[in-house]
Amino acid sequence: MLKMSREEFEELVGTALDRIPSELSQAMDNIAVFVEDEPDPSGPELMGLYEGTPLTERGEWYAGVLPDRITIYMGPILRHCQEPEEVVHEVAVTVVHEVAHHFGIDDARLHELGWG
């Protein structure tokens, strides 16, 4: 498994978020992004997770709710990658994947678009 400091990993996540086109990042609403070491051990080994109500499903009732949450998991990504360049790529893909869920894009469509 590759070694990387939490700070370095968080910088990669920040860089990936910064690369989201401004017209999309400006449309992101009520969302927080976190880095955690590992996903819930009772579930699958996820690289990222989106939790919340996608923009496409929000209606008049959507007010006063806690922010949606994107979590990027450091451990699974580092175990999946062999080289530092792969980590950069995998973090970027994972961030885009989870942000896409915020916009209401499901896994099937993401796979069609090459962001599986």
Image (tube, helix red, strand yellow):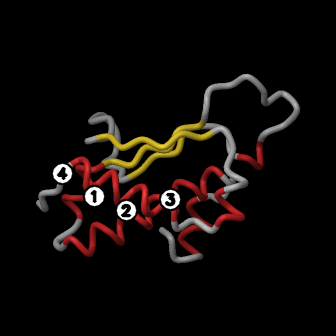
Q: Residues within 10 Å of mark 4 (few under 14, many from 20)?
A: few
Q: State which tag comes first along the sequence, 3 or 4.
A: 4
Q: State which tag comes first along the sequence, 1 or 3.
A: 3
Q: Is residue 41 left or right of residue 17?
A: left
Q: Which callout, 2 or 1, points to the residue nearer the camera?
A: 2
Kindly state the secondary structure of the residue where label 1 is placed: helix
Tag on residue 91? 2
Kindly state the secondary structure of the residue where label 3 is placed: helix
Mark 2 in CB contact with mark 1 (< 8 angstroms) = yes
Q: State which tag comes first along the sequence, 2 or 1.
A: 1
Label 3, label 2: how far apart the Cα atoms are: 10 Å
Mark 4 in CB contact with mark 2 (< 8 angstroms) = no
Q: Is residue 75 left or right of residue 90?
A: left
Looking at the rendered structure, the kind of residue marked 2 is Val
Rendered location of residue 105, percent (x, y): 65, 59
Q: Residues within 10 Å of mark 3 (few under 14, many from 20)?
A: some
Tag on residue 17? 3
Tag on residue 77? 1
Rendered location of residue 11, percent (x, y): 34, 56
Looking at the rendered structure, the kind of residue marked 3 is Leu
Residue located at (61% from left, 37% from top): 52
